[in-house]
């Protein structure tokens, strides 16, 4: 969502700037030739006569209103959902807020799991609610899962997290001949 917001913000800003520039051009044109009312780039007189004959209950007016409401609701949803998803940590003193990014937590857990002897590869995704570890390595899948869970739990227990995320560990034994590197 943050990427969408980063794309939408400049586009909407450019559209508002273009409308402002158009308004300035039309106002300057009206000052230079008062009384015509035709507009330099926008046919104001034609628009005025069209709008004067259209009723508020007409189908095009209602469809435009519905479209404006839908676009506004979508923009509001994008704005609200694109907030940062930091992970809260316990405060060392009153009035001090401490948080970390999910990426940092994933790196900490991942480095601890990858340091285990039987683990040849591991990927970690983290959020404030859950940490998912996918480990691949030598030996039995059950032992690999248990060792990975112990290492990941050790990291989560050592950190002063305000709320401990749920830990999910998936471990797959490495198939012969699929190792990408020598450890």
Image: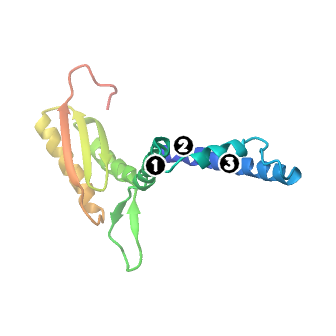
**Residue 27 on image: x %, y %:** 79, 53
Q: Dot 1: within a 10 Å radius of its alpha carbon, few (fewer than 14), some, or many (20 or more) residues?
A: few
Residue drawn at point x = 69 percent, y = 46 percent = 18
Q: Compute the Cα span from label 2 to label 3.
A: 19 Å
Q: Circle 1 sits on which residue?
A: 57
**Residue 126 on image: x %, y %:** 31, 49
Q: Earlier in the sequence, mark 1 or mark 3?
A: 3
Q: Compute the Cα span from label 1 to label 2.
A: 35 Å
- Please give left or right for residue 68 compared with residue 130 in the image: right
Q: Earlier in the sequence, mark 1 or mark 2?
A: 2
Q: Secondary structure at mark 3?
A: helix
Q: Circle 3 sits on which residue?
A: 19
**Is residue 169 in sight in this rendering?**
yes
Quarter-of-image position of residue 42: top right
Residue drawn at point x = 46 percent, y = 44 percent = 67
- Say which of marks 2 and 3 sits in front: 3
| Snapshot colouring | rainbow
Q: Earlier in the sequence, mark 2 or mark 3?
A: 2
Q: Circle 2 sits on which residue?
A: 7
Q: Dot 3: within a 10 Å radius of its alpha carbon, few (fewer than 14), some, or many (20 or more) residues?
A: few
Query: Considering depth in this image, is 34 or 95 the residue closer to the camera?
Result: 34
């Amino acid at each position: 969502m943050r990427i969408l917001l980063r794309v939408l913000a400049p586009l909407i800003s450019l559209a508002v700037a273009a409308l402002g520039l158009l308004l300035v051009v039309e106002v300057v044109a009206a000052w230079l030739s008062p009384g015509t009312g035709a507009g330099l780039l926008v046919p104001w007189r034609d628009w005025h006569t069209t709008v004067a004959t259209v009723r508020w209950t007409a189908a095009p007016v209602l469809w435009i209103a519905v479209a404006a409401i839908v676009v506004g609701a979508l923009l509001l949803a994008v704005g609200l959902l694109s907030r940062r998803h930091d992970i809260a940590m316990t405060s060392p003193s009153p009035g001090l807020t401490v948080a970390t990014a999910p990426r940092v937590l994933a790196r900490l857990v991942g480095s601890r799991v990858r340091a285990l002897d039987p683990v040849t590869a591991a990927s970690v995704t983290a959020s404030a609610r859950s940490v998912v570890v996918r480990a691949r390595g030598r030996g039995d899948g059950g032992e690999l899962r248990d060792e990975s869970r112990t290492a990941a739990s050790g990291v989560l227990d050592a950190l002063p997290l305000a709320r401990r995320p749920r830990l999910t560990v998936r471990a797959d034994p490495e198939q012969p001949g699929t190792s990408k590197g020598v450890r």
